[in-house]
Amino acid sequence: METEAQPVGRATQNAVVVAIMLGMLLAALDQTIVATALPTIVSELGGANHLSWVVTSYLLAETIMTALVGKFGDLYGRKRMFLISVVLFLVGSALCGMADSMLWLVGSRAIQGLGAGGLMVTAMAVIADVVPLSERGKYQGFIGAVFGVSTVAGPLLGGLFVDQLSWRWAFYVNIPLGIVVLVVAAFALPSVKAAVKPAIDYLGILLIGLAATGLTLVTTWGGNQYDWTSPIIIAMAVGSVIALILFVLVEQRAAEPLLPIRLFRSRVFSVCTSLSFIIGFAMLGGVTFLPTYLQYVHGASATESGLQMLPLVAGLLVASVAVGQTISKTGRYRIFPIVGTVMIAGGLYLLSLMGNQTSYLQTAVSMLVLGLGVGLCMPVPTVVVQSTVDYSDLGVATSGVSFLRTLGSSFGVAVFGSVYAAQLPERLAGAIPPGVDPRAAQSVEGVHSLPPAARDAITAAYADALHVVFLAAVPVAALGFVVALLLKEVPLRDTVRTSVSGNSSVGDSFAVPASADSEQELQKLFAFVVQNHKRNPGPEVLAESGIPLSLAQAWMILRVFRGGAESGSATLQEITGDLKVPPGVFEPLAAQLVADGYLSETLGHYRFTTRGLEMFQRFVGAYRVWILARLEDWDAESAPAFSAAVDRIAEQMIDRGQSLTTGKHAALTGA
């Protein structure tokens, strides 16, 4: 449960929303902006065997931070955690831009990932603090669009910076924009933190972090820097497995576990999280290594490689939006991951056939197939999990799906990178003709400055290495197909179906981390229900309940309750201070409520009469009934926490959702 944020004016609200969305855009862009810059970075810094860690370190750090920062926000305040996250992101970006070695860059990316994870998790909670519930669905859709845009723009922007400035500007560009976010957030964000201190599963987070990092290092170093049978690899693998087993044991006893193991007793949850892991594995692995093929083999510039990847991104976007709309209308979903995993396997196989003579048209078709396959799968795990878990598990189950997807992405990049690092030196060793400086084969410019015969031999070596990379990922997609066959078709909750339509699936598809707080997730879902309603429910509620008040009078009664929560009475200035409207505008409305016996007034202070308090309780109750009618497929009265969440949603709907923050002053004051 949280202490309630004070309402803010429209100008402040807009400033906060712009700052939050800009921060999220920066964090989302940096998941993919390095993809087209990686070949150039490797050319300059060397360390091709660390290539995948430029992406993996960011993802692992982001994953760990998303598990921590929500609880830290409850403890210390979301504003403080958001500002700390921005600072971490800025420091990481600056260090990335200054990197003079691959190891420096990898470490800096980890710092950047910590900041990005904090930005993403706290952003939606901050939006909830300043945006009325009735308008929140619109902004949640915008955030989804931000992640969709970043997936398209990231590789392209990375290429533009490489070609026009330097790869370092892919990181430096964050600094001026991040400073704007920091300044606006410092002055405009309200300070809100939980009224009750949450329990933080430090040990669980530590163990899963050690297990994930260890297993990622095993897949990266095994067969490359160390033999698979070397003591280091064996010890690291055994240690990682032990950490994973201990994590399972700890989660069974933790007060508020990061990922409750009991959820995996549900076949639906187990299948959905497995699918989410595989989807993340396939998507980011492909996005990360395709620019290497396009630049080294096709000879595309960094910018051109970003443009040439659009078929993959377009397929992903179109398919995920279409699936979201279809699920919303029909409630059917099982066929999509089945077909999608087949297309992922097919797309990866087609990519494995690419050689140095493959036309761009054939490459584009292969990318399109992969993108469509990933897009068909993406929206399904979250939708199904949210429709099957109890309200008490809504937060941890939803965050568990996004957690496993991000973890899958980091493993995907690591495995792709491990195969690439193992294959490339061997292929290049036999491809470089006598008399050619081997260093020329390490950079895009060097390769394409060679005579045609030498160039063709080296580009064929790169294509052969990537052939093995993509082919090695096909069995993972095939495993995804088997998992998809195990997915059951279950009835979907109406709120979830509405949200997947309103969100167009884009936000959840592109790794917007979910909150582990069930009430926050319920509010996010309900915001789309309200948006879909397309009209102010206030008159409808009043008519159905028989309450003899106009909407303006009902609104004023609730504002009196809010303004006088501590002292028992409130002036017009206190009642309407956040609306940036002269208090005198509401004096006739207050006078009418006094005349009708709902309020009393003494020296400009208004307080409830017994009749007014009774009417306030009736109005809140009527809104509660209206809300419950739209949440009838949830736990309803059987869960005390759900009931309390509905009460708070009802108060938000009346107070801020239907208040003058909508700008329709005349509708309320013209009673």
Image: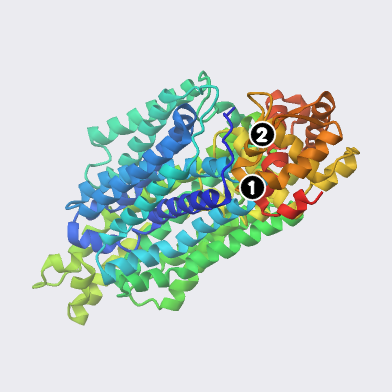
Looking at the image, which residue is at 53% across and 21% down?
Answer: 252
Residue 414, image x, y percentages? 35, 48
Q: Please, what is the three-letter code of the amino acid marked with disc 1?
A: Pro
| Residue to which mark 2 is pinned | 571
Using the image, determine if residue 411 lies above or below residue 6.
Answer: below
Q: Quadrant of residue 603?
A: top right
Residue at the right extreme, as displayed: 546
Image coordinates for residue 525, horizontal then vertical, percent: 66, 44
- Measured from the top left, where is residue 166 in percent x and y? 24, 65
Q: Residue at x 43, y 68 (%)?
A: 309
Q: Amino acid at mark 2?
A: Thr
Mark 1 neighbour class, 10 Å CA radius: few under 14, some 14 to 19, many 20 or more: few
**Label 2: how many residues lie within 10 Å, few (<14), some (14-19) or many (20+)?**
some
- Please name the residue shown 86% across and 40% down the image: 549
Q: Quadrant of residue 351?
A: bottom left
Q: Return the residue at label 1.
A: 582
User: Between 259 and 593, which is closer to the camera in this rendering?
Assistant: 593
* Kind of element beneath mark 1: loop
Asked whether residue 491 is in view, the answer is no
Between 225 and 588, the one lying in front of the other is 588
Residue 544 on image: x %, y %: 89, 42
Mark 1–mark 2 Cα distance, whole angstroms, equals: 12 Å
Q: How many marks?
A: 2
Assess whether mark 2 and mark 1 are in contact (beta carbons under 8 angstroms).
no
Q: Is residue 654 left or right of residue 74?
A: right
Is residue 93 in view?
Answer: yes
The kind of secondary structure element at disc 2 is loop
Q: Residue 601, relative to residue 100: is it above or below? A: above
